[in-house]
């Protein structure tokens, strides 16, 4: 493709003659770079390109599972099964232990519970963030393992 350089007045006259628009491509260059094109078509192409890029992106889904510091074994197994399903479906998992009132004294039990969950779900996901106490919640994030 041949590139021609025109003075501003000549470029405007040429654009009017061809019934096209002058579009500034690089305003910071010395001299500024402009292109003669159909601006509506250019906007349409940009919109189409953006739509294709948006369709290719994956939306991250975060599922939550809540435990108490003294969660019973049956309840733990039930919630573990749900966590397994979430990770298999490709969602990230936010597991947390919620401490009510004075149960904050059992924070070691909460940490043990979350680490046990991470160990049990090792084949389905990897720990993204280790258990961390924030206020009355101890939170841990798990991300699904990549499918081969």
Image (cartoon, rainbow, N blue to C red):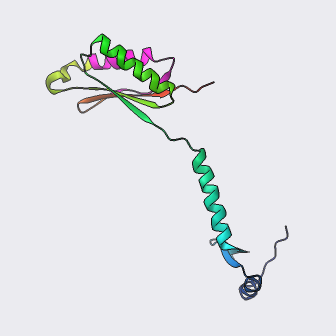
> What's the residue at 66%, 73% (across, down)?
39
Res. 46 image quadrant = bottom right
Q: Please name whichever residue, 9 or 60, is drawn nearer the observer in this view of the structure.
A: 60
Residue closest to the far left:
102
Assign the N terminus to one quadrant of the image.
Answer: bottom right
In the image, residue 8 above or below residue 26? below
Image spot of residue 102 (x, y percent): 14, 23
Magenta span includes 33: no
> Which one is nearer the viewer's eye here, 40 or 29?
40
Q: Residue furthest right?
A: 2
Image: 7 above or below 78: below
Indicate whether residue 127 is drawn in magenta: yes
**Above or below, comparing residue 97 to residue 59 in the picture:** above
Q: What is the magenta range?
A: 109-132
Name the outermost residue toward the top: 73
The C terminus - image quarter: top right
Depth order, front residue of 65/127: 65
Image position of 80 with respect to 9: above or below: above
Residue at the image position 60 percent from the left and 25 percent from the top:
147
Left or right? Give the position of 14 relative to 112: right
Residue 86 coordinates in the image, percent (x, y)? 45, 27
Between 61 and 26, which is closer to the camera in this rendering?
61
Q: Which picture quadrant has residue 36?
A: bottom right
Identified at 14% across, 27% down, the residue is: 101
């Amino acid at each position: 493709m041949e590139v021609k350089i025109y003075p501003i007045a000549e470029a405007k006259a040429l654009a009017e003659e061809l019934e096209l628009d002058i579009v500034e491509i690089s305003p910071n260059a010395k001299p500024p770079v402009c292109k003669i094109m159909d601006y509506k078509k250019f906007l349409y192409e940009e919109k189409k390109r953006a739509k294709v890029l948006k369709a290719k992106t994956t939306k991250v889904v975060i599922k939550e599972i809540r435990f108490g510091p003294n969660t019973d074994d049956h309840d733990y197994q039930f919630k573990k099964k749900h966590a397994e399903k979430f990770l298999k479906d490709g969602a990230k998992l936010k597991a947390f232990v919620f401490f009510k009132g004075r149960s904050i004294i059992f924070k070691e039990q909460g940490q043990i519970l979350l680490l046990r969950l991470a160990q049990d779900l090792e084949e389905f996901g990897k720990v993204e963030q280790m258990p961390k106490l924030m206020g009355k919640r101890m939170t841990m994030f798990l991300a699904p393992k990549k499918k081969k």
